[in-house]
Image (cartoon, rainbow, N blue to C red):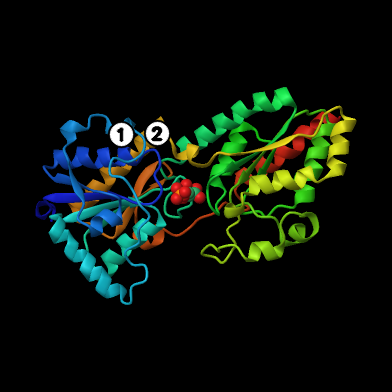
Amino acid sequence: MGNQIKKVGILTGGGDCPGLNSVIYGIMLKAYDASIECVGILKGWKGFLKNQTIPLDIAEHDDLHTVGGTILYTSRTNPFREVSSKEERAKELAKKFEELGIDALIAIGGDDTLGVADNLYKLANAKVVGVPKTIDNDLAGTHYTFGFWSAVQLASNTIDNLTTTAHSHQRVFVVEIMGRDAGFLTMYSGISAGADIILIPETPFDLERDVIEVLKKRVNAGYKYHILVTSEGAYPSLESLNQDFKTISKENIEKLPKDTFGNPLLSTLKISQIIVDELNLRDDLKEEFQKNDVDFECRSVVLGHTMRAGTPNSFDRILGLRFGLAAMKLVLEGTFGNMVSLQGNKIKTVPLSEGVKKKYITPENDKMELRDLLVKIRYLSKQK
Ligand code: F6P
């Protein structure tokens, strides 16, 4: 089987993240050893449609695994969007393999990119292998995606750093963290940096109970500055939205674009600024701060794309290389329609259709308990 493969195409799709180049290098190492040529397809499925390729000569890319971003560029292009027949489209796309001169394709991407790969495999029997990628870490088929821990470290360092300015001015900082509708990035970086309040999409928050009451308890316990971290997709409970919010209403929210589950995309509103605006309207909160000789001042910081920037950390370099190696081995074995994944510390294989399902933080996750203890025990212990 393996000797039928002479040239392998590689593409990267979706948002970039540290570790993409590490995967590419892992593939190239194994391919070179097996005398297989690699070709880079540019800008994900966009370049695939336009036959945009570059040669990938390993001699020209020493230590590529240490470099952030992707040398192949990326785009969010779905060639199956708005087509009348998926089967026909899949067959057309499979013919591109010949035009591109590739015998197999390794697609590195998130649920969209790998969903296309799955359609190609299922509907046109194309020789595709997937490598899961997203800094959000919200893919069910793998315990971790590369890029996630680099992003957590960046966000955690920034939150650590913000404490000095928060301390100097005795301010409240509301830090907004990427992750769409999944809270992994916020939860891990918030716990790592010891944030005082952590809001994630999986547990809709109550402004009064989870923010205002906690800030009052903290300031009364002697704390002079406070760091609240919120996911870009964190969402108030409907009850809290109706009762506590003055600057947004159910009606505003209903007009927003919706995610795949039909939830309004609050990230388009910038939840961190909404929280700041709401807190600024609360005279009772300001009085509580003043009683403790602190002027109430609140600022929002959106970490945004800084979280995807820079070089991969060691974990992500090694995970990327391992994924690349494993993906190339699947090509050599002739096992297609699967993606590589990390289960515990082992690299395993799962069907693309299973692997790309979404995952969220579940209530039994010990990080939930840690978050709640971190918030509660600090002010309680100071009150004694
Ligand atoms: O899915 C990765 C991610 O970084 C999300 O956390 C974020 O909401 C989104 O991509 C941002 O997308 P873009 O780079 O297109 O602005």
Dot 2 corresponds to which residue? 312
122 or 66: nearer the viewer: 66
Q: Which mark is residue 360?
A: none
* Residue 58 falls left or right of residue 314: left
330 or 105: nearer the viewer: 105
136 or 269: nearer the viewer: 269
Determine whether label 2 and label 1 are within 8 Å by CB.
yes
Residue 38 place in picture, x, y as percent: 17, 45
Dot 1 corresponds to which residue? 65
Q: CA distance from mark 2 to mark 1?
A: 8 Å
Q: Residue at x 86, y 27 (%)?
A: 293
Residue 250 place in picture, x, y as percent: 70, 64
Element class at badge 1: helix
Residue 190 place in picture, x, y as percent: 61, 38
Q: Is residue 170 above or below residue 356?
A: above
Under mark 2, the amino acid is Pro
* Residue 23 falls left or right of residue 373: left
